[in-house]
Image (cartoon, rainbow, N blue to C red):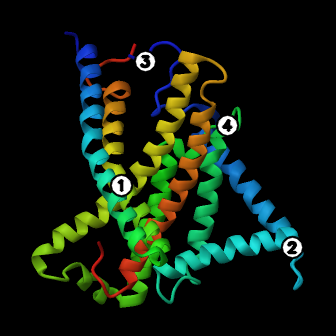
């Protein structure tokens, strides 16, 4: 395989495996927040604010993987552009 | 790798040259946004009255909502951070959704604008911490549970600023990227739902950026350990 093909495979692996963990974590976080809101609807505003911030934190991991994949594809130090 | 008309998200198109300084397209769009926002705010707030009209009521609603949200996060300090964080929120909303206008690109879809904003947040956190606790007092906060955790606290201070930058950049850039790819693959009407989703993402990311900035400031000025 040439370095181009290897880096495409690397980008795919980075995004696909990097999405698994955050997906599971976000599912758990949303499920827990739903349960809490169902139990105590009056605390929904503060819960949803905390949920959003937490989801952003979790999502950052997936975004890191995406950025790594884009770096591999577009700013690869081993591939000389043109 | 980079053939064809596909632009790398790390490329910066240079539109004009000011002496030795190249001026890129996101910078020009940011200038435009800043001008529009400043003139618009000036125009909208130039004739404030006690009996508010329609636009004034909408503005007051916006400002008081932002202030209320900040006040819930930063106890007894929502008002004093309203100018910084409120401006940041409004600028982020406009710059995140500006990619939807044909011919414009969201400035936050390039790494430099989120980096600058995250740097502003970082400095604001440090300055407000110093102002509240004093110089030595704030430095002592870093060695809070034990002196052994000093490097970790400093590291977390840096990495959370970095993640603030990467989060905004990644979300906005990936949205534009996906729209471009779907447009290339499928044609004219198909990316419309994705563009709607991108509007929502832009609003949520502006909210999250501002909320996280407020949380960091609250952690710096409050008694509790910065998270």
Q: Distance between the Cα atoms at labels 4 and 2? A: 29 Å
Tell me the tag on residue B2.
3
Tell me the tag on residue B101.
none
Tell me the tag on residue B46.
2
Element under disc 2:
loop
**Image-quadrant location for residue B104:** top right
Q: Which residue is mark 1?
A: B163
Q: Distance between the Cα atoms at labels 3 and 2? A: 50 Å
At label 2, counting other C-alpha atoms closer than 10 Å, the crowd grade (few under 14, some 14-19, many 20 or more) is few
Nearer to the camera, B197 or B17: B197
Mark 4 or mark 2, earlier in chain: 2
At label 1, counting other C-alpha atoms closer than 10 Å, the crowd grade (few under 14, some 14-19, many 20 or more) is some
Q: Distance between the Cα atoms at labels 4 and 3? A: 22 Å
Nearer to the camera, B116 or B67: B67
Residue at 45% x, 59% y is: B118
Relative to B157, does residue A8 appear above or below in the rendering?
above
Mark 3 or mark 1, earlier in chain: 3
Q: Chain of mark 4?
A: B
Is residue A44 visible in the rendered image? The answer is yes
């Amino acid at each position: 395989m040439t370095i181009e093909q290897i880096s495409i495979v690397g980008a795919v692996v980075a995004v696909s495996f990097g999405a698994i963990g955050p997906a599971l974590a976000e599912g758990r976080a949303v499920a827990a927040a739903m349960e809490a809101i169902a139990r105590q609807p009056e605390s929904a505003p503060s819960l949803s604010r905390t949920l959003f911030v937490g989801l952003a934190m979790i999502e950052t991991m997936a975004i890191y993987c995406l950025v790594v994949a884009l770096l591999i594809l577009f700013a690869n130090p081993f591939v000389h552009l043109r | 790798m980079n053939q064809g008309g596909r632009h790398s998200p790390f490329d910066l198109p240079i539109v004009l040259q000011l002496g030795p300084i190249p001026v890129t397209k996101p910078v020009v769009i940011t200038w435009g946004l800043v001008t529009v926002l400043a003139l618009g705010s000036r125009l909208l707030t130039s004739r404030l009255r006690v009996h508010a009209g329609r636009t004034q009521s909408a503005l007051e609603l916006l400002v008081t909502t932002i202030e209320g949200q900040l006040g819930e996060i930063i106890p007894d300090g929502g008002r004093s951070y309203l100018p910084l964080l409120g401006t940041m929120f409004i600028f982020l909303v406009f710059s995140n959704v500006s990619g939807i206008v044909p011919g414009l690109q969201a400035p936050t879809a390039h790494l430099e604008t989120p980096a600058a904003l995250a740097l502003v947040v970082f400095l604001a956190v440090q300055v407000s911490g110093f102002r509240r606790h004093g110089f030595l007092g704030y430095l002592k906060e870093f060695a809070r549970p034990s002196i052994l955790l000093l490097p970790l606290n400093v590291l977390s201070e840096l990495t959370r600023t970095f993640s603030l930058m990467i989060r905004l950049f990644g979300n906005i850039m990936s949205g534009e990227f996906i729209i471009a790819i779907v447009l290339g693959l499928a044609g004219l009407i198909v990316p419309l739902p994705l563009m709607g989703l991108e509007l929502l993402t832009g609003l949520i990311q502006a909210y999250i950026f501002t909320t996280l900035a407020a949380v960091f400031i609250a952690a710096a000025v409050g008694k509790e350990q910065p998270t």
